[in-house]
Image (cartoon, rainbow, N blue to C red):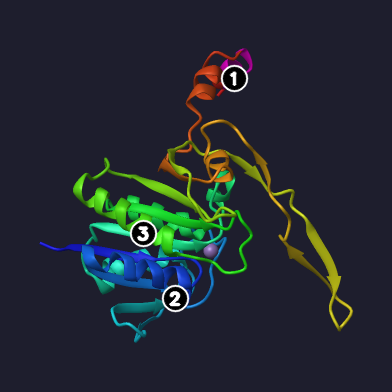
Amino acid sequence: MDALILLTNDDGIHAEGLFALNAALASLGRVVVVAPDRPRSASGHSITLHKPLRIAKVKMPGGGEWYSTTGTPSDCVLLAVHEILRRRPDLVVSGINDGPNLGWDLTYSGTVAAAMEGAIIGAQAMAISLVNTGNHPEWDYGLASEFALRVASLLLREPLPPHVFLNINVPMPPDKRLRGVMLTHQGIRRYPGRIEKRVDPAGRVYYWLGGDVPEDRLEPGSDVEAVSKGYVSITPIHLDLTNYALLEQLKSSPGFAKLLENC
Ligand code: MN
């Protein structure tokens, strides 16, 4: 039986990266796109509980099965499984994101959250992002979509254990030549959190978040380091955020022992 593949993203249904992904994966089976009707970057793992969601079947140049929804990337996966496909897809691919999802980006990312939702429903899942490390004026999704095809066919042939997924970042180095592929751990990248304070025409104050350059720590073996050196980064991710080393440390901490005793 042909594989059933669900595509989504957080850049919205008109994003170039989604078109590239759809074209690249068509040979693997039945590909269905269910994506937000507008950009939803940095929406994290949010789902919509307090307002109605709508689905629209969309005709796209080049054909294929396309649906837009008024929801978040995670809503899209849930609507796809329960309403559009009416069964669990074999593979969920989210992307190709317009920009990095490295280090602590993962906690904000709608792209990564959609792959998380894929892992939660028990499908094979991957998030894939393009990082314009060479500051090229044009974004070239070619290499990333070729790579997505290779990983997608691998996941269908050799599935990962349940409830994990892959977070993939493909760089676009200055010479557009990839140096190779590295299996990595999630690294450290933080945004200094610049907030711009402005005044609207009515004299009321408002704020713009973001626009700041992230601070990367180039730890060896991390996703951040791999991409900065021109390598494709593949990080296996699970949904367990527990710090196991700290858990053990807290168990033998006198302060915490007291806290536990006195309850
Ligand atoms: Mn995005």
Looking at the image, is mark 3 or mark 2 nearer the viewer?
3
The residue at which mark 3 appears reads as: 146
Looking at the image, is mark 3 or mark 1 nearer the viewer?
3
- Mark 3, secondary structure of its residue: helix
The residue at which mark 1 appears reads as: 256
In the image, residue 255 lies in the stretch drawn in magenta? yes
Note whether ligand 1 is within 8 Å of mark 1. Answer: no
Q: Amino acid at mark 2?
A: Ile
Q: Amino acid at mark 1?
A: Phe
- Mark 2, secondary structure of its residue: loop
**Residue 1 numbered tag:** none
Q: Residue at x 34, y 72 (%)?
A: 33
Q: Which residues are magenta?
A: 254-259
Q: Quadrant of residue 134?
A: bottom right
Q: Give residue 194's position: percent from left, percent from top.
A: 77, 55
Residue 79 can be seen, yes or no? no
- Mark 1, secondary structure of its residue: helix
The quadrant of the rendering that contains the N terminus is bottom left
